[in-house]
Every structure is written in C-alpha cells, then in structure tokens.
Image: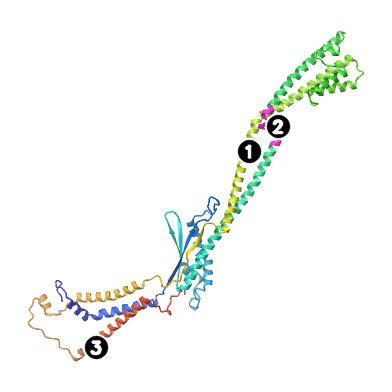
Amino acid sequence: MRNPSETINIQEIIEIILRRRWYIIIPFCLSMMAGILFALTFPKVYSASTLILLQPQRVPEDYVRSIVSADIDSRINTLSQQILSRTNLEMIIKEFKLYSGPKFEKMFTEDKIESMRERIKVDVTRTRRDTNAFSISFKGRDPEKVMKITNALANYFINENLKTREAQATGTSDFIDDELSTMKKRLEEVEQTLKDYRENYMGGLPEQLESNLRILDRMQEQLVERRQNLTETKSRLGAMERAISEGQPLQPEGETGTGDTLTLDQLTAQLKQLKTRYTDQHPDIIRLKERIADLEKEPEVPIRNRQIEDTKREIKTLEGEISDIQKQIKIYEVRVEETPKREQELLSLRRDYDNISETYNSLLERKLEAELAVNLEKKQQGEQFRIIDPARMPEKPSGVDMIKIFLFFITAGLGIGGGLVFLLEYLDSSFRKPGDIESHLDLPVLATVPAILHPREVRMKKLNQALSIFFIVVAIALLSGFTFISLSGFELESIQQPYIIN
C-alpha cells in the first residue's frame, strides 16, 4: 500500500511495469492485431475529379443576345440531376462493366444505381458575383476506371449542356414563330376591318371633314340661289296668268325681267354661253337642255301657252333641284354630325391596329434574334462549359488516413494497458516494502525475511519471463507489420466489401 503523499521515482515505475507487464503486452498485441486486420480489410477508395470552367459567350452580346435565360445555378442543378438519373447511371455501369462478377449477381439494380449516385459529387466554386467553375468527382476501387468514369461524366455534362441550350433556343424560336404567324393573321384581319370601315363610310371620314364643310357651304349657297330663282319664277308665272285673265298681251319673250329666252335660237345661244363657264353637269345647263328639247318637240304650241308651260316646267325643275340640294345637304350634314363618332371608331380601330402592328414588329425582331441565337448555339459560340483540368489516374487512395489510424491503434493499445496498470495499482492495498508498513501502521520494522521460492515457483517464474520475452518480440513484430501496412498502403485483395465498385 502506497501513501498518496509519496512521490514515485523512475525505478518504481519500471518495477511496476515489469510486475504488471502482461496488462500492457496483451492489450497492445490485441490492439496491433485489430489495427492490422482493419488495415487489411478496409477497402482502399480512389477519387478522381475534373474541373470545368464556365466560358462566357464568344460573340459580344451587343451583336447577338442569347435567349437562354436560366441562371447558371439552375442549369448546373438540372444537369446534375440528369447525370445522376437512372438512365445515365445504367449506361455508365454497362459501358464500364461495373458491378460485374459472381459477387454482384444478387445485387439489385437499384442498389447499384444508388451506390453509383453516392460516389458522384458536383462541387460549385463561387466568387463574389458569379459562378466561375465547378468540379465533378467520383470514387471507386479501380484507379483507372475512376479516371475514365470521371472524364465520361464531365463529357456527358458538357454535351448535355450544349443539347439543352440548343433545344431551349430552338424551342424559343419555334414558339416565337408560331406567335408571329398568329399575330400576322390578327394584323391582316384588323387591316381588312379598317379597310372595310373606310370603304363603308367613305365621304364621312374625319380627314374629309373640311371638304364636306366646303361642299355644304356651296350647297347652301346653291339652295339660296335656287329658292330665289323659284320665287322669281313663280312671280312671273302669276303675272302671266293675271295678264291672260285680264286680256292683256304678254310681255315679249326677249323683254322679260328675268332675262330668260323663250325662242329656240335664244336658248341655244344662252346654252353655248353657259358652257363656256360650266360643265354639262351644271344644273343651269341641264335645265336649258330640257327647255330646248321641249321647244323642239312642241313647235306648234302658241307662244302664250308656251311661255306659261315653260315657266311651269322651270318652276318644277327648280323645285326638283331644291329638293335634290336639300337631300344632299342632309347627307352632308349627317356626315359632318357623325364625324366625331367616326373619329372615335377609327381611333379605336387604329389603336388596335397599332398595338397589333407593334407586337408583330416586336415579334419579328425577336424572331430574327432567336434565329441568330439558334445559330450561335449550333456553332457553339455561346456560353458553355469547358474542361480545364481533366481527371487523372489517382496514385494513392483517398478517404481514411492510415497514419492517423496507425497512431490511433498504438495509442489505444498503450492507453488501455496503462489504464489497467494504474487502476490495479490504485486498488492494490498490499505492502511492497518495509517503509509501507512503518508509514501506514506506524510500527517499526525490526527485520525482513527474503522470499523463499519453491522449485516449482522458480520454474514458473522462468517460464513467465520466457513468455514475456516472447510476447514482447511478438508485439514488436506486430508493430512492425502494422507500420509497414500503414505506410505502404498494402491491401488484402481477397477481402472486399460487397457494394464497392471494382
């Protein structure tokens, strides 16, 4: 039994280690054996990675604007899902003959795909503003296959990106083309509607308002003139009728106050004079022609009666002209009154036409841009991914650090042994030297008797010593072997995990 206040010197520590040597040797040997078994059975996993850079569009966007609007993170995420899809992983498994052999016969396809998916990793490298690059890594047992599969994944990633961008650009171009055709039909329909409207309301359109007002003014003047002529003609007819009833002779035709001629020659001369100023469609010319025609048909009518009949016909003609002018005035008044309405209707039609035309022109411009963008993607001049660091064959396994494992098992072996020795010494209440008796029992030691060993005990002691030396040698051998395995990366090829890619 030891006094807690006493200090232990080096000699006592050595004595304790020699006496408790089995509690150190056995845990250490077991720890070395466990470490060697772990090093031999733990599979060596190799990892290869390839670095892919985002290359900007080669043609300046001021000249050709890309129509692929998805941000880079979304595209990488989408392409990563395509890489990890069942179809793509099955294709890689068949191409590189993975999970082949008797030991994988009972392995389900879903387990193979999941095992592949767990060994593929996509890491995105970010800067402050944008995503510049990302890497694709893959892990497996065969370094050469790991390299080839990593490069295959990178090439598939780039090819799928090109296909996706081209498909998106083509789809956008087709969509714009369809919308352009639809908008063109609508534009033609609105154009035809506008054309029909202008034809239906020709003469009453807003731009014809000034012309209609001038024509309306002229017709008003003509109406006043015709009414005045009608009044004068009726007065003359009344005078003629009064003269006849009173038995008075009629005023000669050439002396009438109105200046009208009643003889055929005078009417013909007046017609020639009017033709020098007016066209054949002028009402006065038309009226004179009718009077001349009537005179030519009725030459035998007496002059008196003929004057009355001519005056009546003139009144009838003037009344007809007044009626026609009034009808025309009403037509033009309606046109003038409805001009604001026509203006609003035309404004609405033109607004629809302008909106559709503007949309059509915008779609046409976008169609041209989409065609340029499609050619840009087909010629691979747009934004794309480029491999700047292809995967290389890994020279050493990745994953578990064997040096750390080596130190862990050594520390564990020595720590367990040292802990057991400390615990046993702490709990041991026996006396090892005379000083222990004097310090604990407060009794003086008068004499000590050396241990007298039986011959059998002597043989057992020698055997114990021989076994101790033997197991120390074994421990050293195990330590050396564990050191060699940890530093050299030696692996027991006959022991493999069932779900590790070979």
Q: Residue at x 69, y 39 (%)?
A: 195
User: Which residue corresponds to mark 2?
Assistant: 203
- Residues tagged 3 and 1 counted as in contact (Cβ below 8 A): no
Circle 2 sits in a helix, a strand or a loop, which is it?
A: loop
Viewer-nearest of discs 3 and 2: 2
When asked about the image quadrant of residue 131, the answer is: bottom left
Q: Position of residue 175 (x, y in %)?
A: 60, 52
The tag on residue 463 is: 3
Q: Position of residue 260 (x, y in %)?
A: 82, 16
The tag on residue 350 is: 1
Front residue of this view, candidates 392 and 34: 392
- In this figure, which colouring scheme has been used for the structure? rainbow
Q: Residue at x 52, y 59 (%)?
A: 384
Give the prevailing secondary structure in the magenta stretch.
helix
Front residue of this view, candidates 31 and 133: 133
Give the residues drawn in magenta, as a range: 198-212
Q: Is residue 107 above or below residue 318?
A: below
